[in-house]
Structure formats: C-alpha cells, structure tokens
Image: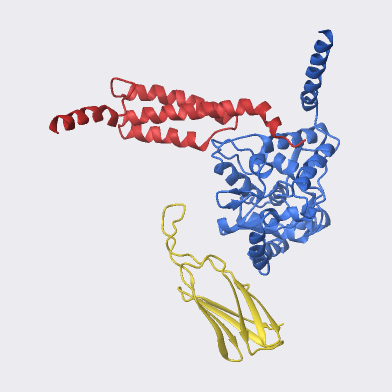
Chain colours: A blue, B yellow, C red
Amino acid sequence: MLRKLLIALAMVAGAAQPLLAAEGASDPKAEFKAFRSYFTNRFPKLALDDFVNGPYSMDEGLRKQWKAIDEFPPYDFAIDKGKAMFATPFKNGKTYGDCFPNKGIGVRQNYPQFDAKSGQVITLDVALNRCREANGEQPFDYTKDDMAALTAYMAFTSRGKPMDIKIPDDPRALAAYENGKRYFYTRRGQMNFSCASCHVQSPGERIRAEILAPALGILNAMPIYRSEWSGMGTTSRRFVTCNSQTRAVPLEPQADEYRDVEYFLSYVANGLPISGPGARP
Amino acid sequence: MASTIRVRAIASGDTTQVQSLISHPMDSGFVKDSKGQLIPPHHIEVVEFEHAGKVVFTALWGPAVSKDPYVKFSFKGAKKGDDLKVSWVDNKGQSDSTVAKIQ
Amino acid sequence: MKRSLALAMVLALPLTLGLAPTARAANEADYKTAYSAAEAAAKEAASLRHQWTVTVSALAAAKKAADGGDFDRAVAAAREAEALAKASIFQAISEKEAWKAMEIR
C-alpha cells in the first residue's frame, strides 16, 4: 500500500517536471536545436538548405514550375527598382548606405536585430524607414511597392549568406524572442489557427489548393513576388494577410508582436541561406 | 526610361530557345480600384520577335494575360551572336522594343 | 387542400419573422441594448489584440440593419457579434497557457 502510494507520488512529481520547465525562462540555443530537429526528422530526405524554398521543397510538381519561372523570376523588376532607389541620394545628399554597415550591401542576414538603446527588435524594414526619417524623408508603407523593392535588392546582395541573428545577453532581448515564440504558437482568429497549426503541424500538406511551407527557414526568401498578389510583398504583408485568412483582425504592420515573431523565426533559421527575394504561388 | 523587356536567347545547334519577361500592368479593364472605379484596360496587344528581318514569333495578347507576362519559345535558323529584336505594342498605342544578342 | 395551405401559411409566418423564442418584434431599445453589449465585448477583445474579423462585420451588419429600420435583424446580428467577441476573449485567455501545448520541444 505504502509502495503504491510512493510510486503514485513519484509519477505525479515526474509528470509535474515538464510544467516546471515551461515556467522558467527560454533556452534559445536548445530551442533552436529542437526546432531544426523537428523538421529534419520529419523530412529526412530534404537537404537542410532546401527548407528555405518553402512549398517548393515539399512538392515535386510545384518545384518544376518554380524552376521554370526562376529562369526569369518575376521579382527581377523589383531588384532593379530597389538597386536604383538604393543608389539615389536623399534630398540632403546622404544615401541608404550611410545608415548601414558595409554600405548596406550584404547585411540583410543580420536582421532582425535587438536594439539596446530602444529596447526593441529592429527589422530591416524598420531600419530602412528610420534611415529615411533621419534624413528628412517620408517613411514608406511597410507592406509593398517601394519597401518591397528596397528589401528585395538588399536580400539579393545577401543571397546565399547564412541567417545570422543574435540574441544578446539582455533580458529584454530574451523577452522579445519569447514574445515572438509565444505569438507563433498562439491560436487566433475565428478559425483558431496558430502559425504552428499550418507550418509546424502540416508542412507539405494542403490547405485548400495551397501547399504549406515548413516553418524552418520560412522568412529566408522574403520579400516575395506572390502570384496571388500579382506583385511584391514584404514580411509585413504576409503576416497581415495570414492573420486575415484565419479571420483575425490583423495588427499594424511592424507591430511589436510581428517584429518579435520575425525575430524568433529568423533566429531558429540561423545557418540557413538567404534565398530572397523569392517567388511564391 | 529603363527597358520593360528582359530577354535571354540561347542557341543550341540549330535551335534557339528564347525566354522573355515583360514589365506591363496588363490591366484587363474588369478590375475595380479601392474607390470602386473600374481600372481602364491597359494591356499589350502584339509582341513580335524578329531575326534577320523576319518575324519568327508573334504573340497576340489581351485582357486574359496577367501582369508582367513571361513567354518562352524556340525557333530554328539562328546562331550564336545573331541579333534578336523584341517589340510590343499595347492598346493605348504605347510600345517598347529591345535588341539582344543570341548567346 | 385549402385548409392545409392556410395552416402552412400560419405556421410559416412566425418562422419567416425569425421569432422562435420571443413573442414580439424587436424595437430600437432592444437593438441599443444588444448593440452596446456587443460593442463592449468587442472592445475588450480588441484590447487583448485578439479581435476576429467576423465580429467586426457582424457589428457593422447590426448597425446597417438598424439604420434601415430592421431591428429584428439588427438584434440578431448584435447578439451574434457579442457571442463572437466573447469567444475571441475566451480564446485570448485560454491561449495564454494553451499555446505551450503546440510548442516544439
């Protein structure tokens, strides 16, 4: 009787362990490993770098179409536009290059970054608009057109470089990472989907006519020319439309939660190559 | 103004494969803008590819072709180094053309 | 034949008015009560940043129906909006812990 009681108590104590672990602070390094392993175990035949190609790494038919389009990619015009914009000085004579290390060439893989001064996550898009405002120019709409062209060009100069996101030893940075992680897994909208519902539970499967991309490396191709949009769109555009599609009222582009989830998703994709700008169905 | 036409032509033996991406809104005339007004039709009507003074490929496009159209085709009788001329005209009478070397 | 037709019409009438539970048609006061309850719930959902698009459109439908004088439909839409808003609040609160179940470990 006492033995059974002791065993029962031990089982309860053992069962409580995972809950206690979850209450503590995150361990990004461990979570990074777990995130990557989940996907490599689920798709053992897929080369690690291939995850950044989203639905094209999940379906052979889609992949063939993509390869054919890639010979003359639809985002080509956006790259040219972005390159021209990047080279054009502001009214005060300064350029975008003056706001970034290495004149803004080959730096996209370092974003988002945690900015200690403001205590916030800064995405590349926010950094570009801050640059504009600091030089007396109007900020761009975050979702498409000019912002998409600029980030398309910057992504292009970083093609092939591994994602390199840092979480500095600052509790605010860790909190931002955790906030992003929490957002990613939280169900929202009348359809009660979280980002994970589609991109962790069902990569490679269909939602209506679309094939779902795996969450690993899902932002590496941004910004994208999406056939559905007949045009370019940024990470902001995708987050906003994803929210609407689950019947959740979207947040403002580059809202705290969106920047934090971009931080989280980019961090767990560290090491995977930048493939942007990309094309998607 | 930057060219709206991107073209790549690659000769392999007697056959040349041509790919072209053209920047154009290709408005069908059936879509409404955010204010509820119809966006007037503005689309390419004719695309022509010429080699050695002869038209080797003609495309007759209309409202069903979507934005920034892409076309791919092959033709015989050209060789590396030859010129390939691409030109288009749209329903508003606007046009553009370019000449590319076959690789 | 005539009697069953008349009976069918009598039975159909209250159904077409959508008056299953209540005995009388809704008036503006009913609408205002229902709408303010719905609006309050929607405000709370919005403050939790968990608003649903369908809540917003149900509220708009309620207002539109009321502006057109159709208070039955307006009350029905307002009640639906309130239910949707409350569901989204429940979602926001329960997801505070429930998200962990989805986390890759």
Which of the 4 quarters of the picture holds residue A151?
A: bottom right
Residue extending farthest to the top is A1
The structure residue drawn at horizontal position 80% and vertical position 19%, both measured from the top left corner, is A11
For the point 68% across and 57% down, which residue is it? A56
Farthest-out residue, left: C2
Q: Is residue A222 above or below residue A13?
A: below
Residue A100 pos. (x, y %): 79, 53
Q: Nearer the viewer, residue A18 or A169?
A: A18
**Residue A172 in the image, given as x and y percentages of width and height:** 79, 33
Given residues A243 and C31, the one toward you in this image is A243
Q: Is residue C63 visible?
A: yes
Most extreme residue toward the right is: A169
Q: Nearer the viewer, residue A165 or B56?
A: B56
Q: Position of residue C51 (x, y in %)?
A: 55, 33
Whether residue B102 is situated above or below residue B67 in the rendered picture: below
For the residue pair A67 and A173, the one nearer the viewer reads as: A67
Q: Decide if residue B60 is on the left or right side of residue A187.
A: left
Question: Would you say residue A95 is visible in this rendering?
Answer: no
Q: Quadrant of the N terminus of chain A?
A: top right
- How many marks the image carries: the answer is 0
Residue at the extreme bottom of the image, as rendered: B53
Which quarter shows the C terminus of chain A?
bottom right
> Residue at point 75% right, 56% down?
A50
Residue A5 % position (x, y): 80, 11
